[in-house]
Amino acid sequence: MQDINDIELLRRYARDGSEEAFDAVVSRHLNLVYSVALRHLGNLHQAEEITQAVFVILARKAHSLRKRTLLPGWLHKDCLVHSR
């Protein structure tokens, strides 16, 4: 799944319920989301909660992301919104 882009993986997840596809996206971006949350909040436990929330939201919105969505940017923005 390394050769498949993020949006295609999310479409597979939304269309087929492929946990493998969603796990691949999470593993690619987990460190980014967690580090943004930790820098913003300064609290390990809150950063973990925000990280989990961001990926739950991503799972819910997977079907609606546009083909041109830059997922790292989307995740960064969502992380900041939910850590306020």
Image (cartoon, rainbow, N blue to C red):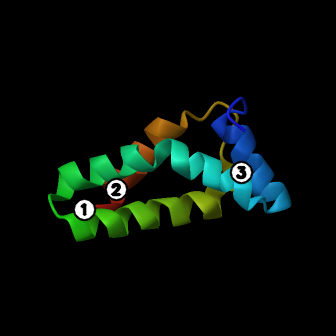
Residue 57 visible here: yes
Q: Secondary structure at mark 2?
A: helix
30 vs 58, left or right, is: left
67 vs 27, left or right, is: right
Q: Residue at x 76, y 48 (%)?
A: 11
In this view, which residue lies farthest toward the left?
42
47 up-or-down from 12: above or below: below
Per the rendering, the mark at residue 21 is: 3
Would you say the residues marked 1 and 2 are in contact, meaning their CB atoms lie under 8 Å apart?
yes
Residue with the mark numbered 1: 84
Q: Position of residue 41 (x, y in %)?
A: 18, 59
Real-space Cα separation, disc 3 to disc 1, in angstroms = 29 Å
41 vs 54, left or right, is: left
Per the rendering, the mark at residue 81 is: 2
Q: Secondary structure at mark 1?
A: loop
Q: Position of residue 64 (x, y in %)?
A: 69, 51
- Which of the two discs, 3 and 1, sits closer to the camera? 3
Would you say the residues marked 2 and 3 are in contact, meaning their CB atoms lie under 8 Å apart?
no
Observer-nearest of 5 and 24: 24
